[in-house]
Image: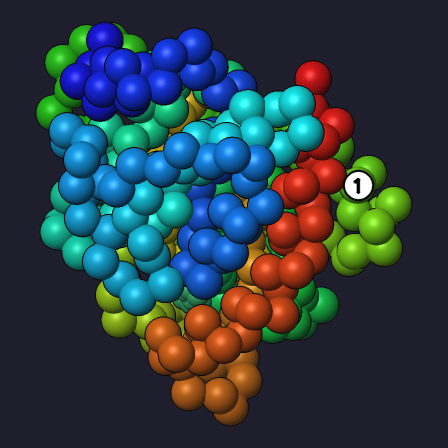
């Protein structure tokens, strides 16, 4: 058992979250709906990264929504911050070590689909790793050869679609492509991404999905579309714009998450 898991369990005996959640840029307000949360700063937890990008807090919260115990990572480390593709290895393994059987990842992404405009939400069906790096580089055992077919669990996704229909939320779906950032993509790169079959682009999530699948967790991932990808609109891309547009999709995403957790069994 890892030091972080032991430490958390020593502070909060009997805790057994079933679902882990990772909150992306600007999505931190979700933690306000947690019942009786217990929070740890990443600084307290052995092996956890600094989560220094604005909009990212760097806290692990344990709490409940209805009867479902959950563990929420508010803030992630990105590959572009350190050049380490495995920056989220300890947090993901900590969620699995605490007992999470499922992981829901959220992020902000640029859209390559005209139909999915800024402020909308997309369920990820599959991904393209366009970075050439992998969080499992250097691992020694055979469990580094992780099967990535059906990485994004179709049962979880269809539950999200049912909830979206009931709540009158338009939930797009598509393939997410991971670019390493931190500069945004060029219009030429986005044209290539489109030819390869990508529907949304971002700088996170994929390494976490690989780590989560290795750890045996079921995975769902939802993107808040904050902008049209480079070359698809006249807007200048910036982190500030990402944050401002995230606000619009947050409400829908939050409603989907809460309902999913209320119905979780
Ligand atoms: N590209 C990469 N990452 C992003 C984008 C984008 O257009 N929007 C939000 N995160």
Q: Residue at x 46, y 54 (%)?
A: 28
Figure quadrant, ligand 1:
bottom left
Residue 177 seen in render: no
Q: Does mark 1's beta carbon lie closer than 8 Å to ligand 1?
A: no
Residue 61 seen in render: yes
The residue at which mark 1 appears reads as: 163
Task: From the viewer's perspective, tell me whether residue 112 is left or right of residue 3.
Answer: right
Residue 103, percent from left and from top:
49, 29
How does the figure colour the protein chain or chains? rainbow
Residue 218, percent from left and from top:
53, 22
Q: Residue at x 62, y 70 (%)?
A: 248
> What is the quadrant of the N terminus in the image?
top left
Q: Residue at x 57, y 30 (%)?
A: 64
Residue 254, percent from left and from top:
63, 51
Residue 207, percent from left and from top:
33, 38
**Front-lying residue, 30 or 109:** 30
Crowding near pointer 1: few (<14 within 10 Å), some, many (20+)? some
- Tally of numbered discs: 1
Task: From the viewer's perspective, tell me whether residue 17 is left or right of residue 248.
Answer: left
Residue 68's place in the image compared with 126, above or below, is above
> What is the quadrant of the C terminus in the image?
top right
């Amino acid at each position: 058992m890892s030091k972080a898991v032991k430490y958390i369990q020593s502070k909060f005996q009997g805790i057994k979250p079933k679902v882990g959640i990772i909150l992306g840029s600007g999505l931190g307000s979700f933690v306000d709906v947690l019942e009786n949360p217990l929070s740890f700063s990443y600084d307290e937890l052995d092996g956890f990264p600094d989560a220094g990008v604005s909009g990212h807090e760097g806290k692990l919260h344990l709490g409940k929504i209805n009867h479902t115990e959950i563990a929420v990572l508010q803030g992630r480390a990105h590959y572009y911050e350190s050049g380490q593709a495995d920056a989220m290895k300890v947090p993901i393994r900590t969620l699995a070590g605490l007992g999470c059987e499922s992981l829901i990842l959220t992020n902000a992404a640029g859209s390559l689909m005209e139909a999915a405009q800024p402020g909308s939400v997309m369920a990820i069906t599959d991904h393209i790793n366009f970075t050439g790096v992998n969080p499992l580089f250097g691992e020694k055992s055979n469990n580094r050869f992780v099967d990535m077919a059906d990485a994004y669990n179709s049962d979880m996704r269809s539950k999200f679609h049912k909830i979206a229909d009931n709540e009158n939320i338009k939930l797009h779906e598509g393939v997410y492509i991971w670019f390493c950032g931190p500069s945004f993509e060029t219009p030429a790169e986005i044209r290539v991404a489109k030819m390869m079959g990508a529907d949304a682009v971002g700088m996170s999530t994929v390494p976490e999905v690989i780590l989560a699948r290795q750890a045996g967790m079921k995975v769902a991932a939802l993107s808040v579309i904050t902008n049209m990808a480079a070359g698809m609109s006249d807007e200048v891309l910036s982190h500030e714009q990402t944050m401002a547009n995230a606000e619009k999709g947050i409400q829908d995403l939050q409603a989907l998450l809460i309902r999913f957790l209320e119905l979780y069994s």
